[in-house]
């Protein structure tokens, strides 16, 4: 994951996490990157200092997080795990399965998996309710 410092056309500064530089470019091109303050999709990367990841650096980053943020992160991770425990993993068939459940073609149940941005947009347009589940760095270790 890469953290980018971003700015919008109205000079609002904010951060965004992306899997790669290409991921940022693709999401921006599709209109998925917006300013959280004003909603503008005219967003660009701001100048930022390079970060070198070392064990010591990671430790400092963790210590820089306030207690409230640490507790929120723990709760969010626990909620994410609980949601996965009580649902069926359907992999890249998420959009297809969610539609079947929504339209009554299969039994209603909790599911989770992956969907492309276009699939997610299409689900919203069809009125299918879903919630993105956050992915944490240690989920991939």
Image (cartoon, rainbow, N blue to C red):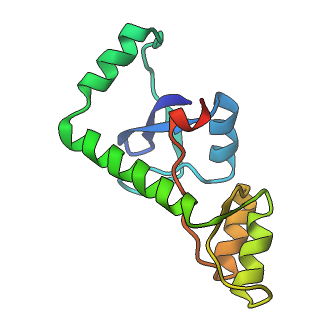
Left or right: 75, with 53 as reference point: left
Left or right: 90, with 80 as reference point: right
Where residue 25 appears, as percent x and y from the top left, is 67, 37
Left or right: 119, with 49 as reference point: right
Where residue 67 appears, as percent x and y from the top left, is 19, 38
> Is residue 112 among what the camera can see?
yes
* Residue 100, picture quadrant: bottom right
Residue positioned 62% across, 37% down in the render: 24
Query: Relative to residue 128, is residue 22 depicted above or below?
Result: above
> Is residue 36 among what the camera can see?
no
Residue situated in front as seen by the camera: 113 or 47: 113
Residue positioned 42% across, 48% down in the render: 77
Where residue 73 appears, as percent x and y from the top left, is 35, 44
Residue situated in front as seen by the camera: 81 or 95: 81
Query: Relative to residue 138, is residue 62 depicted above or below?
Result: above
Query: Relative to residue 23, is residue 110 depicted above or below?
Result: below
User: Residue extending furthest front?
Assistant: 85
């Amino acid at each position: 994951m890469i953290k980018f410092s971003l700015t919008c056309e109205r000079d609002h500064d904010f951060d965004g996490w992306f899997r790669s530089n290409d991921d940022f470019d693709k999401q921006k091109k599709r209109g998925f990157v917006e300013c959280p303050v004003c909603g503008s999709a005219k967003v660009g990367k701001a100048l930022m200092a390079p970060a070198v990841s070392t064990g010591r650096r990671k430790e400092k980053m963790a210590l820089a997080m306030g207690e409230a943020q640490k507790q929120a992160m723990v709760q969010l991770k626990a909620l994410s795990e609980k949601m996965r425990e009580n649902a069926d993993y359907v992999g890249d068939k998420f959009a297809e399965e969610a539609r079947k459940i929504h339209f009554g073609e299969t039994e209603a149940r909790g599911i989770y998996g992956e969907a492309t941005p276009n699939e997610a947009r299409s689900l919203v347009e069809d009125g299918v309710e879903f919630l993105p589940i956050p992915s944490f760095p240690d989920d991939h270790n």
